[in-house]
Image (cartoon, helix red, strand yellow):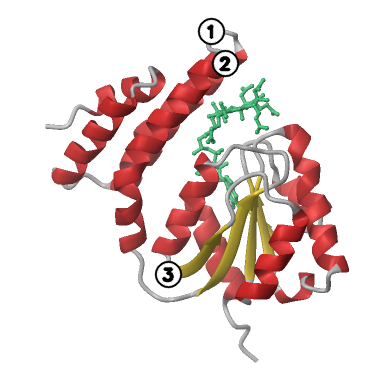
Amino acid sequence: MADIQKLYDAILNGDAKSAAAIANEAIAENMSPMELIQKTMVPAMDEVGRRFECEEYFVPELLLSARAMKAALGPLRPLLAASGAQPAGRVVIGTVKGDLHDIGKNLVASLLEGGGFDVVDLGADVSPDKFIEAVKNSGANIVCLSALLTVTMPSMKTTIEAMKSAGVREQVKVLVGGAPVTKQFAEEIGADGYGENASVAVSLARTLTKPVSA
Ligand code: B12
């Protein structure tokens, strides 16, 4: 049977090969991908963050753990996407300018795909202009902005302001998220919603795109 504690340890120790192998084993045993992510993989990354904060880990360890997390997510992502049902809308998603963190954003994108949304993923370090161009080209009705650094949170505001100036703000609902982001901050910068995790992102996206009955 897949040893889930070993998956936690593999992410914590930056062992990408073992992380992917255990994730594959878990899938073969029909374990729930969402449960693996929420109960084992995200807590492992939280512990990585804690160790970084108290200077037990440094950037190289962060990178190795992030690589292991991505390796384990690789085989799980298609399953997350396959679990969805109704086509629900089109989402443009990205991590805002100056910010390279993309693991959480990737999870949100996968679950939105799983929730039946068409997802245009712009990656990380995305400028306001790129968001605007993608909204125009794709006809998206939702924009998801992710930020993991307090210093890049203002880029969320800049992006929303730029969308206003470009005349595309009205055609989309803007959702924001990422560890340092709060509901209050979302309100302050004029976003339409804030989600603390990927599942909330999907339910919010569904609610916000639901046609209002007359
Ligand atoms: C992995 C990691 C890295 C990796 C990123 C690799 C990658 N490809 O993503 C690397 C090594 C590159 C990195 C670099 C840095 N990092 Co870093 N990193 C982390 C770490 C350990 C984990 C982040 C993560 O992936 N979490 C797991 C995912 C699943 O969680 P999540 O991102 O929060 O996403 C969930 C929710 O927030 C939400 N969500 C996310 N986005 C969105 C969007 C929407 C719309 C919605 C609704 C929801 C939503 O849903 C997600 C899934 O449930 C965190 C610590 C932590 N615990 O957060 C530090 C952390 C974010 N990093 C930090 C720092 C300081 C840095 C560096 C400045 C370090 C340095 N000195 O160089 C650089 C900055 C580089 C840059 N310009 O971006 C600090 C930030 C402090 C702050 N408040 O500003 C943290 C908090 C560590 C710490 N405790 O000090 N980092």
From this viewpoint, is residue 140 visible? no
Pick whichever of labels 3 and 2 is earlier in the sequence.
Answer: 2
Residue visible at 25% across and 29% down in the picture: 4
Question: Are the residues at dot 3 and dot 2 in contact (C-beta closer than 8 Å)?
Answer: no
Residue visible at 81% across and 43% down in the picture: 154
**Quadrant of image for the N terminus:** top left
Residue behind mark 3: 116
Q: How many neighbours does mark 1 have within 10 angstroms: few (below 14), some (14-19), or many (20 or more)?
A: few
Secondary structure found at label 2? helix
Residue visible at 54% across and 22% down in the picture: 49
Answer with the quadrant where ligand 1 appears in the image. Answer: top right
Name which residue type carries label 2: Phe
The residue most toward the top is 56
- Across and down, in percent, residue 201 comes to 54, 56
The numbered mark at residue 52 is 2
Name which residue type carries label 3: Gly
Q: Real-space Cα distance between discs 3 and 1? A: 41 Å
- Across and down, in percent, residue 112 comes to 47, 61
Question: Are the residues at dot 1 and dot 2 in contact (C-beta closer than 8 Å)?
Answer: yes
Residue nearer the viewer, 73 or 36: 73
The residue most toward the bottom is 214
- Across and down, in percent, residue 34 comes to 34, 47
Whether disc 2's CB lies below 8 Å from ligand 1 is answered yes
- Across and down, in percent, residue 102 comes to 55, 42
Q: How many neighbours does mark 2 have within 10 angstroms: few (below 14), some (14-19), or many (20 or more)?
A: some
Q: In this view, does 1 lie to the left or right of 124?
A: left
Residue 153, picture quadrant:
top right
The numbered mark at residue 56 is 1
